[in-house]
Amino acid sequence: MILVVGSVAYDNLETPAGKRDNVLGGAAVHFSTAASFFSQVAMVGVVGPDFEDQHITFLRSRGIDTSGIVVNPQGKTFRWSGHYLNDINHAETLATELGVFASFEPKLSSDHAQTSHLFLANIHPRIQASVLDQMPVVKFVAMDTMNYWITTAREDLQKVIKRVDAIFVNDMEAKMLTHQKNVMNAAAEIMNWGPKVVIIKRGEHGALLFTKDFVFSAPGMPLGLIVDPTGAGDSFAGGFMGYLARSGNGSEEHLRRAAVFGSVMASFQVQDFGLDRMRTLTTADIEQRLKQFKTLSDFSGHAVFG
């Protein structure tokens, strides 16, 4: 099983494809939904009394353990408003209302504390550290972060990075974190701090996976229309961690496969607003797209010089 600790939110979104308000979102939600196609998932998060029961029903329909979602009656559910009108790869934040998420202090149940795989979504590094302190027997830990924590909580962030097995960051964040000018050097420096695996997210261009022994490039799926990129990075992480937990194997072969499954899930996530594509997604759809990814970069059997 995978435990994910992170945000549960309502999003107000605007992209070139349209506009939607009060969309179910949040890093923990996007991660859990993607990962649930491969593995059992448990969520830990906080919502307000304004959070609708239909969303819990949806998450449970995916087999997700929602017992760690706490309702705090003292405020409202975290809300984020943003648009992608100037650049489909980068969101512009219009408003952030933390609500009950501002005082989020996760307390794990005894069952959750025994989970084998952990994903620390994009939250304050001190909260990430407190979760790690509650999981002494966890086998594989991955984390996400963002430029805000890099600039405002660098010391706390670096302490957490030293304790995890894998980290997900985009190329800009990797350079900002390490003060390096290219991702190769940035990934190498991050690995020197402790993580065995560094995954550099590159939006529609896929992702780069770094270990001490190899570098792997997972392509992005060429799509004619990207409807909503929100949650794509968390969906990538969900596919990646879901596959790893399912395989129970962290070998080079399985890490490469996990990166491709991450790209597969992210490619579906961006095809509709919020979680609408995930609601209709089937394992047959995933298998078909996996075949597309396999042929996307396959050049085996071709002569080099005639």
Image: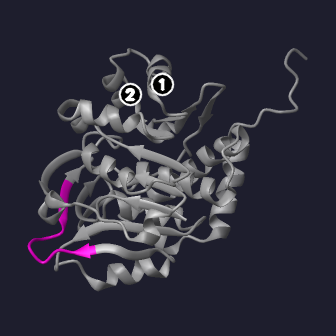
Q: How is the image coloured?
A: one colour
Specify whether 53 is left or right of 73: right
Disc 2 or 1, which lies upstream in sequence?
2
Specify whether 278 is left or right of 230: right
Observer able to see residue 229: no
Queried whether the magenta region covers residue 227, the answer comes back as no
Residue at the spot of label 2: 174
> Could you say whether the residue bearing mark 1 is in a helix, strand or loop?
helix
Position of the C terminus, as image quadrant, is top right
Position of the N terminus, as image quadrant, is bottom right
> Could you say whether the residue bearing mark 2 is in a helix, strand or loop?
helix
Specify whether 152 is left or right of 91: left
Residue placed most toward the observer, 220 or 28: 28
Residue placed most toward the observer, 262 or 306: 262
Residue at the spot of label 1: 187
Pointers 2 and 1 in contact (CB under 8 A)?
yes
Label 1 CA crowd tier, 10 Å (few <14, some 14–19, many 20+): many
Q: Which residues make up the magenta segment?
A: 70-81
Q: Quadrant of residue 116?
A: bottom right
Residue drawn at the location 29% of the way across and 85% of the way down:
53
Residue 2 x/y as whole percent: 51, 61
Queried whether the magenta region covers residue 71, the answer comes back as yes
Observer able to see residue 62: yes
Residue placed most toward the observer, 172 or 137: 137
Residue 182 x/y as whole percent: 43, 17
Label 2 CA crowd tier, 10 Å (few <14, some 14–19, many 20+): many
CA–CA distance in space, label 2 to label 1: 7 Å
Task: Give amino acid for label 2.
Answer: Ala
Residue 8 x/y as whole percent: 29, 65
Task: Give amino acid for label 1.
Answer: Ala
